[in-house]
Image (cartoon, rainbow, N blue to C red):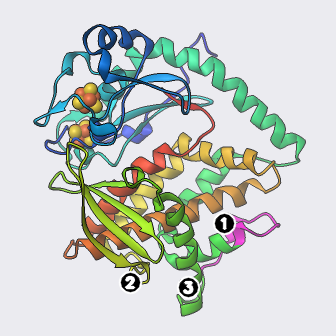
């Protein structure tokens, strides 16, 4: 298989376009890794701008301003080393996930993919695959045995993991999964010992106070996990339409809002009690945007790979549909809570815009989650 046609999926790119929109520069806020072939240029010309990182593996990366701001090569909104920018920068917002096959995923935190302008994403994706084919094949040689071992472990534990079956079951209920009444049942049944059946899930009759309390509690557990950063600059970033970098941190009973400058200076803009941020049932256009996003997630190998990672982490004790159902329901809650947070700090957003901004805030962290496989 690995010498024949490349096992490849580009379906996430179908019908999408991409244009880089100034003055966003969200991608220049991440610390780009320097691949071995790229290190030489920076060692020779900018030796003080390379840092050696030990996590998650030993590698060189470009220095950040003050160790925490944007990439040190971002000057007046422009990249100083544009012709020599690392692979990561050239590729963004496309990510190549390599698991049992290669799949190109699009980072929906990039505003440039929401404008329906610019390059055809499919053409760009194909170009990227051609440019990276040997690296994709090399990584497949490593990841295919990992997937094989995962399948073997599941079989040993008596667990049936049928990816296409669970994907099509979720796909058949996408509209309903934008309803918190069904998410509440999915969440509840995902922690039971018995295997849950996605086709037979029944939505709660109503969103009563008890159900909402339970959902809010789970959402808070999720976001507290991701937003309770010890160091402020590790808090999740939301890049607003004006290009500002907004950091939100959960601190005790409050959520703090800070804005980071290009230089890495952080200014506090406000705070709200957590109890004032209420999980909302999406309606109207927001619901349609959520539905489209769930479709993307359900097809993403990195999302599936996160559920596999958890199966392994839980020692293959839980039925596969329960693990996937748990990942899906908690992801929806995390996203909806962040959407409510943005609506609370930036009131006046229109229907549809709220959910889009929530996804812009959420997707980069979603793609950053552990997965079975690797991004190249
Ligand atoms: S995040 Fe997207 S739109 Fe923003 S600078 Fe990067 S590529 Fe361009
Ligand atoms: S090298 Fe250039 S494109 Fe890459 S993160 Fe730094 S400033 Fe941005």
Q: CA distance from mark 1 to mark 3?
A: 26 Å
Cβ atoms at labels 2 and 3 below 8 Å apart: no
* Residue 119 in the image: above or below residue 291: above
* Residue 376 in the image: above or below residue 45: below
Cβ atoms at labels 1 and 3 below 8 Å apart: no
* Quarter of the image where ligand 1 sits: top left
Residue found at x 38% / y 13%: 39
Of the residues tagged 2 and 3, which is closer to the observer?
2
Q: Earlier in the sequence, mark 2 or mark 3?
A: 3
Main SS, magenta residues: loop
* 39 drawn magenta: no
Give the number of the disc on residue 276: 2
Residue 318 seen in this snapshot:
yes
Q: Which residue is mark 1?
A: 199
Pick whichever, 244 or 293, lies toward us.
Answer: 244
Pick whichever, 332 or 49, lies toward us.
Answer: 49
Q: Residue furthest bottom?
A: 209
Q: CA distance from mark 1 to mark 2?
A: 35 Å
For the record, the magenta segment spans 189-203
Give the number of the disc on residue 281: none
Residue found at x 57% / y 69%: 221
Give the number of the disc on residue 213: 3
């Amino acid at each position: 298989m690995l010498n024949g046609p490349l096992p490849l999926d580009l379906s996430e790119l179908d019908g999408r376009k991409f244009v880089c929109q100034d003055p966003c520069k969200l991608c220049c806020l991440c610390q780009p890794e320097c691949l071995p072939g790229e290190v030489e240029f920076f060692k020779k010309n900018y030796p003080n701008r390379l840092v050696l990182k030990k996590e998650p593996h030993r590698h060189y990366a470009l220095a950040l301003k003050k160790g925490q701001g944007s990439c040190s090569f971002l000057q007046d909104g422009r990249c100083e080393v544009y012709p020599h920018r690392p692979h990561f920068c050239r590729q963004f917002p496309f990510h190549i996930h390599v698991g049992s096959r290669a799949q190109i995923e699009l980072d929906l935190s990039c505003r440039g993919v929401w404008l329906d302008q610019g390059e055809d994403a499919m053409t760009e994706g194909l170009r990227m695959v051609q440019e990276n084919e040997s690296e994709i094949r090399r990584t497949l040689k490593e990841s295919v045995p990992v997937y094989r071992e995962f399948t073997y472990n599941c079989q040993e534990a008596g667990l049936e993991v049928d990816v296409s079956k669970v994907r099509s079951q979720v796909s058949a209920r996408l509209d309903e999964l934008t309803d918190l009444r069904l998410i509440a049942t999915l969440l509840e049944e995902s922690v039971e010992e018995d295997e849950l059946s996605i086709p037979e899930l029944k939505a709660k009759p109503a969103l009563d106070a008890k159900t909402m309390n339970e959902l809010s509690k789970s959402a808070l557990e999720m976001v507290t996990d991701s937003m309770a950063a010890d160091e402020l600059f590790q808090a999740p970033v939301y890049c607003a339409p004006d290009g500002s970098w907004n950091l939100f941190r959960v601190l005790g009973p409050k959520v703090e809002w800070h804005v980071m400058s290009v230089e890495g200076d952080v200014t506090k803009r406000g705070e709200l009690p957590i109890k004032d941020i209420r999980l909302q049932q999406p309606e109207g256009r927001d619901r349609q945007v959520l539905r489209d996003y769930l479709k993307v997630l359900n097809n993403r190998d990195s999302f599936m790979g996160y559920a596999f990672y958890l199966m392994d982490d839980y020692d293959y004790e839980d039925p596969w549909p329960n693990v996937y159902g748990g990942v899906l329901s908690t992801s929806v809650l995390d996203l909806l809570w962040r959407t409510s947070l943005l609506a609370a700090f930036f009131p006046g957003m229109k229907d549809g815009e709220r959910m889009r901004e929530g996804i812009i805030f959420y997707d980069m962290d979603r793609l950053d989650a552990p997965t079975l496989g690797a991004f190249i």
